[in-house]
Amino acid sequence: MAGFRGRSVCRRRPHREGGLPPGRLGQHPTISRRGSRPPLSTTLASRNWPAVSRAFFDTRDESEILRLAMDHVSAVGPYRAEAGYLRVDGHMVPSPQVGPGHASALDRTVRELTGRDVPVTVPGRPRGRALALHGPGGLHGYLVVTSGSRPTEAQHFLLATLVRLTAAALSVAVAHRLQREDALELHRLRRERAAFQQRLISLVVELGYERAVHEALAEVAASGGGEEAITSALHELTGFPVLVEDRFGRLRSWTGPGRPDPYPEPDPARHEEMLQGVARRGGAAVRIKDRLISLVRPRGEVLGVLAVVDPKDDADEYTVFALEQAATSLAVELSHLRHLAEVELRLCRELVEDLLGGTDEASAYARSEAFGHDLHRIQYVVVVQWRNRAADDAFARTVGRAASAVGMPSLVTRRSDHVVLVAEGSPRDHALYETLARETGTPDGTIGVSARCDTPDGIPGHYQEALRALEVRRRSRRRYGTTFFDDLGLYRILGSGNEYQELEAFVREWLGQLVDYDGRHRTELVETLSRYFDCGGNYAETAESLAIHRSTLRYRLQRIREISGHDLTNVENRLNLQVATRVWKIMLGGPG
């Protein structure tokens, strides 16, 4: 600090004890008072350094320590504090400045310093100097002061003491700050360690549960337990009731309590919308009302739905994991079963095709036994045709399931527009038709059933009978339903194909004039004649069935004689007219 040296201390005896006159120190405007503590100027003047130390060391704020030093620089001599700098992250950052007008110039100068006390130029101020604030931890900052006159040796000493005191206080504050930061960092690390330990525990539990799920499902797969075993394992793992629905929303299996009885019938449109919504989630389990649902979807094709019933929303991530893993296992199982079903259906189709075309009995018996079908029993050939349903493998499987459901063990194949069954035993009335109407969601279907077949070599002929029954039903007024060949009566001897043209010519010959008259005048003479024959010629029954008076019936019959030219009392005429009305009503689509 050579720039601040002044006269010898011994020549300034009156100022030896204080460095500046007491009056000036007491009137200095920058001296701050803290409580009952004496002003710093007083303590400096009296060399009461313990009090000075307390003033600096009472605070742990580095900026406050620097401000305190700047505020009291003038108390030790003819000095003025121009600026203060603190070292923050390796850079000199200005603290509150006394001379803001020249701060930018000082900033550039101080940032280039390397920790030494050096003279600096402060515009408008004489004798400027940057004083380094060194401590045990290194350089803490700079204090820039100027001197209006040459200071004495004592004043120079006091300033040096103030600088060392400031540096020491900064060292303590920095050490305290670092200690506090270390404590906070330690606390943070301890929190992170606790969180990591908790996460590690959770991972151990999670891995243990996942291992249990994998082991349980692997054991099911190894045992070949199938669908029921998978749902049972999922029920044991989660504690929730578990169900499996097919592609159309019909229940396949239920494991656990609370099964609805009867199980509600699905709404096809809503069920399809639900499947699409779940599929858009990319295979993740989705909550829908009281169920947590996962699709059974091998290779992108939806085969069904696996769900846990959770009305109270208690399912956690472990339940979701078990559900999704079980859905994957079930997808493999159902895919395998479907592949086996496709192979079985193909082999079964080949057998039925051979039976319909004619094959040796020994081969037919052996091959049918492989499918668990007993050809030694009485067989019936059944043909099924459904409106707006292609006769593909899917529909063939549907028909096969429906036949099994109504007690008709069958061999199944498909032709271009219909499905063929070779069934054991006699079909029960219209049970197959009603079951298929429920399965397909529409009653627009036709079924033809042959007469009984005692041996495999008779199956080709009985197939033609079933087709005849199907065709008669399709050409009747009520074209949807089941027709048995044994119930065809007269129509059993009527052929198909081109012979229908002969039937139409026959009807035209005997009823043509009446049909034309009805068409022109909107009358019902043909229907009246048909109903008259159905009632055995009884006037009262015929009039009642037509809801007309007997005199009206007599008038209509008279008109029929006149228009057709046929005598209704003639036995041959009556036979031909009755056959013609039957053919007209049942096979040619007439009303009735």
Image (cartoon, rainbow, N blue to C red):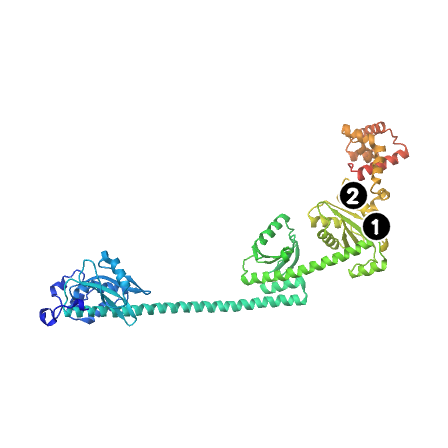
Write down the quadrant of residue 147 in the picture. bottom left
Write down the quadrant of residue 3 in the picture. bottom left
Is residue 11 or residue 263 the one in the foreground?
Answer: 11
Alpha-carbon neighbours of circle 1 within 10 Å: few (<14), some, or many (≥20)?
many
The local secondary structure at tag 1 comes to helix
The local secondary structure at tag 2 comes to helix
Position of 34 with respect to 16 (left or right) is right
Quarter of the picture holding the C terminus: top right
Q: Position of residue 364 (x, y in %)?
A: 83, 58
**Residue position marked by numbered label 1 in the rendering:** 462
Write down the quadrant of residue 478 in the picture. top right
Alpha-carbon neighbours of circle 2 within 10 Å: few (<14), some, or many (≥20)?
many
Q: Where is residue 182 in the image (x, y as percent from the top left)?
A: 36, 69
Q: Residue at x 62, y 61 (%)?
A: 328
Q: How many labels does the image show?
A: 2
**Residue position marked by numbered label 2 in the rendering:** 473
**What kind of residue is marked 1?**
His
Position of 201 with respect to 354 (left or right) is left
**What kind of residue is marked 2?**
Arg
Q: Nearer the viewer, mark 2 or mark 1?
A: 1
Is residue 4 or residue 562 the one in the foreground?
Answer: 4
Q: Do the residues labelled 2 and 1 touch (CB within 8 Å)?
A: no
Position of 448 with respect to 240 (left or right) is right
